[in-house]
Amino acid sequence: MDSKQKIFRITRRQFVASSAAVLATNGFAHGANTGGALAGQPSEQGKSGEKSGPGPGRGPFRVIIDTDPGVDDALALLLAMRSPELKIEAITPVAGNVPLDLTLPNALRMVEIAGRTDIPVAAGARAPLMRRLVTATYAHGENGLGGAVFPEPTTKPVAAPAAEMIRQIVRKYPEEVTLITIGPLTNIATALNSDPELAGMVRALVMMGGSLSGGNITPAAEFNVYVDPEAARIVFQSGIPITMVGLDVTRRTSLTDEHVRTLEAAQNPVSQAAAKIGRNAINHNREHGFLVGPNMHDSLAVAGFLDPAILKLQDYYIDVETAGELTAGETLGYSPVAGDLRRRPGMEKDAAAANMPIRGSAPTLASTKTSPVLRDKFVPNTKVAVEVDSVRFFDLLIGRLSGSKQF
């Protein structure tokens, strides 16, 4: 095991201890600022130079993009690098869709294609915090790009590991950096565990991950959370204002032949690369019997940050199942105005709704304990995307990648 791997491998006892330290330090310290996680909208501490109107053109916003390219990750990276609203401080690949030995060079390839070698790329975790890596080559192909082949990158990653790079940048720009996470959350959890004060310095986190409507790797779990549920739980309980862009909306973003033809018709390196990846991914899906083209999960998270009008968000308390034999990685969403526990309209601010307890598992016959109440009242920790304007999304995505849409 090399020195980089050692950074990310911890024992169960270390995981519990470090997680507790993060939670004890941060609690729900950002509770009053949860609105700052609403896509790219500035929080109350937003800088005076930021534009706050609806739609693209606001910013610039300092971001770190944590990713596991991956077909939709690759297009998300290209979209981000074509968007002047973003000041990308770093890209931090992590193992996920494919191993780090592929996600790292894939990220470097995208940086070179976009002509953005000024952006530092830092190698991240090779494995989840406590589990063996499960990949998604069945969906992304053996090389992570649907079989699309590009030259080997000549750009080199920076020396610092991803978690340390995240920590350094957030501390350099406290309350200014938004983390856009479109892969497993191992790098982010590692950074938080290494620096218990760090969560309080993160402006917001916009993630592609999770689901309130069933999974895509198991019936319960979405892939990014499934791969490292312990890391996801640390992040959700950290107190960082979170926007969760999950399968509830990303399932409505299938890439089509028409989208790819538009990209193929544009004569610029970004559009040509995106078209090549998209075409291969569509063909890969058809060969494997999928009914639709690949969903642009990760691009939607980036686009929702760029243009908040693309998504409708709703407050939830989100937690992650880590112990289930069949449900590990499931994201559980608690809300007094959704599901079977919902109250009448307009009641979400009433005391009765706020007193909704968050319960754990019922006790077994062998136990003398009562059913645990994990939270005695409802305090949202996440804004969850529940509706999407798919037309507006693809107008932004394809427009930016093809170069036809003005910034």
Image (cartoon, rainbow, N blue to C red):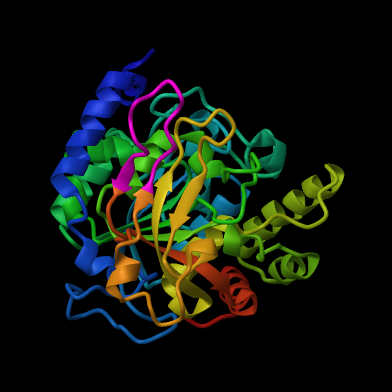
How far from the left and from the top, in percent, is residue 43?
24, 73
Q: Which of 330 and 106 is in front in this view?
A: 330
Position of residue 239 in the picture relative to residue 143 (left or right): left
343 horizontally vs 205: left or right: right
Residue 370 visible in the current orientation: yes
In which quarter of the view is residue 56 placed? bottom left
Which residue is at a point 59% across and 79% down the rendered structure image?
392
Asked if the stretch drawn in magenta spans residue 207, the answer is: no
Q: In this view, does 241 lie above or below 123?
A: below
Residue 367 falls within the magenta-colored stretch: yes
The magenta-colored residue range is 359-374
Residue drawn at the location 68% of the way across and 52% of the way down: 277
Q: Tell me the quarter of the picture where residue 276 sits.
A: bottom right
Q: Quadrant of residue 260?
A: bottom right
The main secondary structure of the magenta stretch is loop
In the rendered image, is residue 197 in sight? no
Q: Eyeballing the image, is 118 above or below 95?
A: below
Percent x, y of residue 365: 46, 25
Query: In screen coordinates, is 148 left or right of 29?
Result: right
* Image location of residue 153, percent across then percent down: 51, 40
Say above or below: 257 vs 133.
below
Depth check: give the residue in front, 89 or 184.
184
